[in-house]
């Protein structure tokens, strides 16, 4: 998403932000439901992103569809998105998906704050999402089952949630959404995106480090410290063992892949891990 759509999403997130500290998880669920309505009607998407229509006409259209069916907050968020400008008809759905996920993430954050630390709630959510992707990655059968277009969506959701039975309510909602409505990507990719949104919420990045063998606690701490220093911020570091890896270590942070060929960045890390 770029240009005018990016600006519209940025404005929508800023508008929603004041509500997030008290938002219930049901709001995220409602927004995902509205997203399903949008994705199910190309005509509605075109109408809501038609530049020839006024903002009032577009927001009035979506309010008419949603009136009495969702909460006032969900209706207002959808109406505000409809009143904004979008470069492509799909962009309004992408924005709604981001906002819905952000609400779920904020609920996890609020629960963590109530328990004595907002970051811990977000970290628990990230760990649950990463645990799901790790289990799926370990089985070709699971991967096939979760992307089977002929399979019943509800059955796929039930299967997905059985893989992480102890996951938080927020993680369960996001995982279910990714499996039932992946919107053109693999469910694990959408779960990964949700995890990245959670990390961004707490001003952190997610680093996935692939190593040839399991790290000791001391080695992990050195890796964490080295990556934090390398990127100038605290990272959420997930470690995966890949015995066939050439070079000893490969790290992905956001869209950047740092592999063994980037000697200026990884040389010191490899020396620390080997010591």
Image: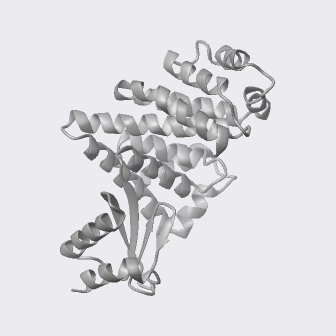
Q: Residue at x 43, y 37 (%)?
A: 104
Percent coordinates x, y for residue 107 in the rendering? 36, 34
Q: Residue at x 31, y 78 (%)?
A: 269
Looking at the image, can residue 10 be seen? yes
State how many labels appear.
Answer: 0
Percent coordinates x, y for residue 17 in the rendering? 43, 29
Q: Is residue 152 above or below residue 260?
A: above
Q: Is residue 112 left or right of residue 65?
A: left
In the figure, residue 19 lies in which quadrant? Answer: top left
The foreground one among 46 and 53 is 53
Percent coordinates x, y for residue 61 in the rendering? 71, 17
Q: Is residue 275 left or right of residue 74?
A: left
Q: Residue at x 53, y 22 (%)?
A: 74
Q: Is residue 178 above or below residue 18?
A: below
Q: Is residue 112 above or below residue 204?
A: above
Percent coordinates x, y for residue 151 in the rendering? 65, 51
Q: Quadrant of the C terminus?
A: bottom left
In the figure, residue 97 lies in which quadrant? Answer: top right
The foreground one among 249 and 215 is 249
Q: Is residue 240 left or right of residue 151?
A: left
Q: Residue at x 81, y 24 (%)?
A: 52
Q: How is the image coloured?
A: one colour
In the figure, residue 87 lies in which quadrant? Answer: top right
The foreground one among 134 and 199 is 199
Q: Is residue 221 above or below residue 166?
A: below
Looking at the image, can residue 131 be seen? no
């Amino acid at each position: 998403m770029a240009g005018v759509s990016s600006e519209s999403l940025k404005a929508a997130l800023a508008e929603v932000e004041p509500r997030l500290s008290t938002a219930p998880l049901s709001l995220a669920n409602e927004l995902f439901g509205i997203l399903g309505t949008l994705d199910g009607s190309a005509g509605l998407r075109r109408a809501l992103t038609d530049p020839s229509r006024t903002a009032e006409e577009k927001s009035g259209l979506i309010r008419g569809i949603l009136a009495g069916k969702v909460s006032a907050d969900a209706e207002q968020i959808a109406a505000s998105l409809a009143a904004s400008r979008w470069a492509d008809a799909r962009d309004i759905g992408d924005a709604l998906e981001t906002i819905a996920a952000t609400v779920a993430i904020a609920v996890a954050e609020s629960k963590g704050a109530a328990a004595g630390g907002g970051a811990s709630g977000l970290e628990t959510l990230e760990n649950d999402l990463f645990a799901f992707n790790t289990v799926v990655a370990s089985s070709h059968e699971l991967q096939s089952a979760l992307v089977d277009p002929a399979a019943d969506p509800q059955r796929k959701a039930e299967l997905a949630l059985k893989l992480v039975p102890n996951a938080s309510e927020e993680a369960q909602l996001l995982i279910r959404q990714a499996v039932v409505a992946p919107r053109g990507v693999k469910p694990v990719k959408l779960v990964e995106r949700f995890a990245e949104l959670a990390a961004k919420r707490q001003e952190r990045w997610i680093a996935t480090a692939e190593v040839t063998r399991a790290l000791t606690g001391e080695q992990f701490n050195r890796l964490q410290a080295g990556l934090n220093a390398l990127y100038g911020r605290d990272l959420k570091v997930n470690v995966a063992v890949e015995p066939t890896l050439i070079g000893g270590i490969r790290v992905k942070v956001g869209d950047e892949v740092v592999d063994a060929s980037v000697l200026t960045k990884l040389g010191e890390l490899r020396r620390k891990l080997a010591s």
